Image: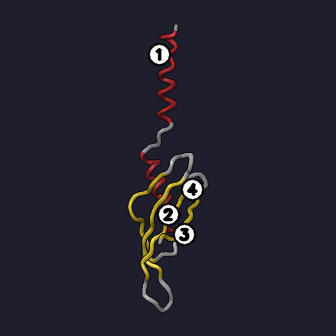
């Protein structure tokens, strides 16, 4: 009886665990969403994402990227700069902090 229960439970457990894994397409879409949101709120000129996205656990719920570019001020040369962008995966909103 126990063997039958265990054998019957295996497909259910496998389905449960495999349904929680994200597809490659979902990861690519997240990457596009993070880049689009972060670049949109950055004040840098000639900006680009540096390196790869870093994902925090689902308990934290954030992904992070570094943006590099130039700050342009009136009557002065462009100044190189970097910003750290945190993207909240639940609310789909980005926040920036200037890096020193």
Which callout, 4 or 2, points at the residue further toward the start of the chain? 2
- Residue at horizontal 46 percent and vertical 58 percent from the top: 32
Q: Going from the N terminus, do you reach mark 3 or mark 2 first?
A: 2
Quickly name the residue at label 2.
36
- Check residue 88 in the rendering and tell me which mark sits there, or answer none: 4
| Residue found farthest to the right | 91
Disc 1 and disc 4: Cα gap in Å?
Answer: 40 Å
Secondary structure at badge 1 equals helix
Q: Nearer the viewer, mark 3 or mark 2?
A: 3
Q: Earlier in the sequence, mark 3 or mark 4?
A: 3
Seen from this angle, which residue lies furthest top? Answer: 1
Count how many numbered circles sit on residues in the image: 4
Numbered tag placed on residue 41 in the rendering: 3
Residue 26 at x, y = what percent?
47, 48
**Residue topped by disc 1:** 7
Q: Nearer the viewer, mark 4 or mark 2?
A: 4
User: What residue appears at the point 44 percent right and 57 percent down from the top-left corner?
Assistant: 53
Q: Could you say which is closer to the camera, residue 98 or residue 92?
A: 98
């Amino acid at each position: 009886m126990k063997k039958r229960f265990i054998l019957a439970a295996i497909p259910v457990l496998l389905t449960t665990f495999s349904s929680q894994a994200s597809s490659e397409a979902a990861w690519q879409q997240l990457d596009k969403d993070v880049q689009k949101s972060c670049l949109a709120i950055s004040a840098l000129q000639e900006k680009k994402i540096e390196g790869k996205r870093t994902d925090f656990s689902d308990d934290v719920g954030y992904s992070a990227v570094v943006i590099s570019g130039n700050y342009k001020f009136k009557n002065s040369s462009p100044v190189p700069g970097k910003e750290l962008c945190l993207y909240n995966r639940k609310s789909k909103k980005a926040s920036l902090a200037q890096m020193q």
